[in-house]
Amino acid sequence: MPQKLKEVDVVVIGVGFAGSILAKELAAAGLNVVGLERGRDRHTVPDWQVPAIHDELKYSIRKGMMQNVAKEAMTFRNHHKEVALPMRQWEAFLPGTGLGGCSVHWNGQTYRFQVADFIYKTHIEQRYGKKILDPELRIQDWGVTYQELEPHFDRFEYLLGVCGKAGNLNGQIQEGGNPFEGPRSREYPNPPMKEQYAGALFRKAAVEMGYHPFIQPSANMTRPYTNPEGITMNPCVYCGFCERYGCEHGAKASAQTVVLPVLMKNPKFELRAESQVLRINLDSTGKKATGVSYMDAQGREFEQPASLVLLTAFALNDVRMLLLSGIGKPYDPVTEKGVVGRNYTYQTLSHVWAFMNEDVHLNSYMGAGSSGTLIDDFSGDNFDHSSLGFIGGCFIACGTTHARPIEFHPTPTGTPRWGAKWKDAVRRHYNHTALLLLSGSSVASRRNYLDLDPTYRDAWGLPLLRMTFDFPDNDLRMSRYITRKAGEIARRMSAKSVSEEPRTGPFTTTAYQSTHNTGGAVMGTDPATSVVNRYCQSWDVPNVFVVGACNHPQNPTYNPTGTLGALIYWTADALKTRYLKNPGPLA
Amino acid sequence: MSEERSENSRRSFLKSTLVAISTATLSSGVRPLMAENGQASATEQGAKPHRFLNQSERTFLKAAVDRLIPPDGRWPGAAQAGVVDYIDLQMGGAWGRGEMLYRHGPFRKGTPSQGFQLEYTPAELFRRSISAINSHFSSQGTSFDHLNAEQQDAYLTSLEKGESDLDGVLSNVFFGFLLKHTVEGFFADPIYGGNKNKVGWKMLGFPGVYTDYYDLVDKHGIEFHREPMGIGEGTISHSMSSHMERS
Amino acid sequence: MNRNDMLRKAGLTLPFLGAVLVAYTTAQPVPTDSAQIGAQIVAQGTARGAVACSRCHGFDGAADGSGAFPKLAGQSPEYLEKQMRVYASGERKNALMEPIAKRLSESEIQAVAQYYASLRANSFAAKPQTSELIARGEQIAKVGDLSLRVQACESCHGPNGFGEPPAVPYLAGQYRQYTSLQIQMYRRGYRKSDQMKDPAQNLRDEDVAAVAAYFEQVSRPASK
């Protein structure tokens, strides 16, 4: 018999970036907040100290920081006519777990989506007409604009101490920054990262070709920084163990390093780790959440009543929780009715390898998560697509996050996969190879969606999330075009040889690409095509808010976290200034 | 939470970290200093690890991994680097037992995009496949390790390209597993039994796990040569990981 | 008696007293190797008035055992060179070292750095500290302290505090008084380092004493 606990004001499901910041804002406003995190409590000291943390086999290969796939996996198929089967190990993307969530093991690359991204449908149709869109595409406007989010971007960037150089200050283009970015109201809180050798070579070639390189904005600190919460971070030492690892120096912005020390001191907040939320409970009308049910590590079930439920468990888990709880109508790809799981998108990654002469010592193992030089000339709609026959774009970044040997041992195209020639090529090229990484947008298609699997279950007996996804052809055409452009830059870098690897279909779960799983609980102004309104509030159950990259109607060029941060503060503001005063639908 | 932690005694804090280091190595399949039945491990006594592989499997693997990463004039091959020991420890640990995989059925053959769908754990996959390979050769009165290098390469290529059935495992799936584990064993931290004396890291010029490059990252093009440092370096006498490194 | 005792007898215990010093001269052939040139400067000083390094740091890089002057033996040469440069520029404040460093040319700096870098680590019987202090120091060195928001020293200073050459100096075997003093210098801004700023500020005095005592008794391998 589940034990019913004393009611609290707020339950937060998943204590990562979004959960921590929202919990801090609401606890500071005087509310009683319980944070339920399925993973462990963990901290910089002692959990992420050298040498134990720099264990490539444990953390990169065996996915030590990630969701325990043995207990809870997801199923996958490319097309709804196939039978979905479990992803029995994580490869293509790596859902996190534990206090701090993905903010512990991310790379720290922090961007703002562009002005046009938030009004994507309007913008594309105005500029090119509907004819440029393949029939399967379902791009949408967000319902919130860049301008409305600007102060919230600013607040998130100052919380994290993002390091960079502004390219557009209140409409004035600035030397040294990204000339394509949306206007920001003030400079970044910290100066840009040091430029690696590979990035410098890329910069030179890019400038010669008329592009506009700038240093990648970074949530790895470039100097000691005390954020507005009064918490201090240390400078990054370019250790090359960033993504998939916790940072030993407190140099990477994470929930632990930017907000948790303040949150944990507030007696209004209680963290319950190792608590697996099973569902959000609704009353008999189905329009009001009464709280959540969860199970602790001993298998005891609890009912936690609450007036307000914040679902911040990572994009994919958010969608699954809505489906398990019966909040919102699940999407059907055949009829196109329903919204939960609709517009699932990803990131269209591709690579260009530049193999340099053996006297060019790149020392790529001296890397940081956000250390790179990049160009935005091919991002989003920054270039004219009129005659190209696709929409969307990629940024092209050169610089290394790492050169950990099990993961990084590039060889030129045509090298055998094993044997003496392979070994020799690995040895010869290891320290003399630059990687140009292209991060591309992902348009929404009617065919790609999330729902619950009919067959496979998790350790708690609940259906796994089922992912139906393949790259829309639009994105493959985009990737081909821009990867060729990146190849030209690589050749300009005096590379001895260049290997271009555009994205090709079908999407496979067997090789890592990105953990930018987006959409599925999109925000918008029309309940027929969105799950939450422009304040991230459920249309169906107004005392449930969902804040995550699941809100993105489609995924633009960049990493989602910077924009997620703006949505976090935008939602916090809506909660504090409007919802709490008068609970009910805000839109 | 921080108040609680500061009240922990120094000793228990230190102990918990040493336990964290040792459980870290345990959870990745490295055998503990004391085997489950409480006896000292063969590792501690200085002999080779002997967690999972039988002799005929070791013999096959020693020859096979040395074709995947062969010795050359300057750098050892996979066998000398301890890759077979690495595989032994991995197959005998949590990874080999399948504890890091979703192992609920029904098991069905999937599309290539759907990845690994076999009902076998990694250890079972190795055992079945190698047994099938060894049987294949013994039925011809020979064994893989008795072939010459060219013949071995041709056979491995046939496994790689083909889909012959190795007692329930497609040969290209087995080959992919073998190659993956060989590369892992060659480059992983020496605490896992491979990359002996850090030969993999030395060959690449990878400096290892101690990594303060703040002052060096923008010295473009410098030749940075350093004896690589691994996880086992850091602990002088107490922790289990230093025992692992010595073995 | 050994050289250290001789120097101590010559009144070198306190660095700021301009005591009369024993000059140590030998007739030697003109050296060509950098470390050999360095050895000459260490023994005799330079014509432009830089005093002989051995007066404070000893010929074996172990100094006089007082802890007032750091051990230099086996330190990364690039690190030693960098310190000489920041002494000369005033960025690292030290009334004794500044005029000396200013009087050395770039090649002389490299030479003395090479000399001391080439020396083997020497064993040194540290005055025993309490086991509790050392255990506390070991904890901070290898694990850090969450409540102080201090990461493990070894994250940057290498396994067992052996250093991460070229940039990060060893702490193992260094005199505890010297190590403690340097953390004070970082705290007060007399030594500048973005990386040492927070650890120096967050460690309390008793933690500084513990870390310094711990590293002093860690022996470094004789060969580099």
Image: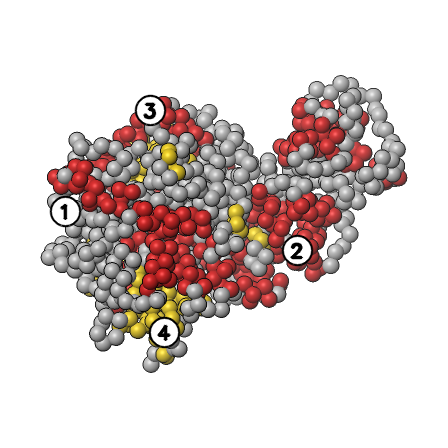
Give above or below for C179 relative to B40: above
Q: Which residue is mark 4?
A: A304
Residue displayed at 49% across by 69% down: A267
At x 66% / y 58%, what residue is drawn?
C135
Q: Which residue is mark 2?
A: C204
- 2 and 1 marks on the same chain: no
- Residues at marks 4 and 2, CA–CA distance in whole angstroms: 42 Å
Residue C162 left/right relative to A20? right
Q: Secondary structure at mark 4?
A: strand
Tell whether label 1 touches label 4 (CB within 8 Å).
Answer: no
> Which badge, 4 or 1, is on the more N-terminal residue?
1
Near mark 3 (Cα within 10 A), the count class, few <14, some 14-19 or many ≥20, is few
- Residue A348 position, x and y percent, is 27, 42
- Chain bearing tag 3 is A
Which amino acid does the dot numbered 4 rest on? Gln
Measure how far apart labels 3 and 2 are at the Cα level.
54 Å
Q: What residue type is disc 3 on?
A: Met
Indicate the position of residue A526 as horizontal and vertical percent values.
19, 56
The residue singled out by tag 3 in the image is A209
Quarter of the figure with residue A286: bottom left
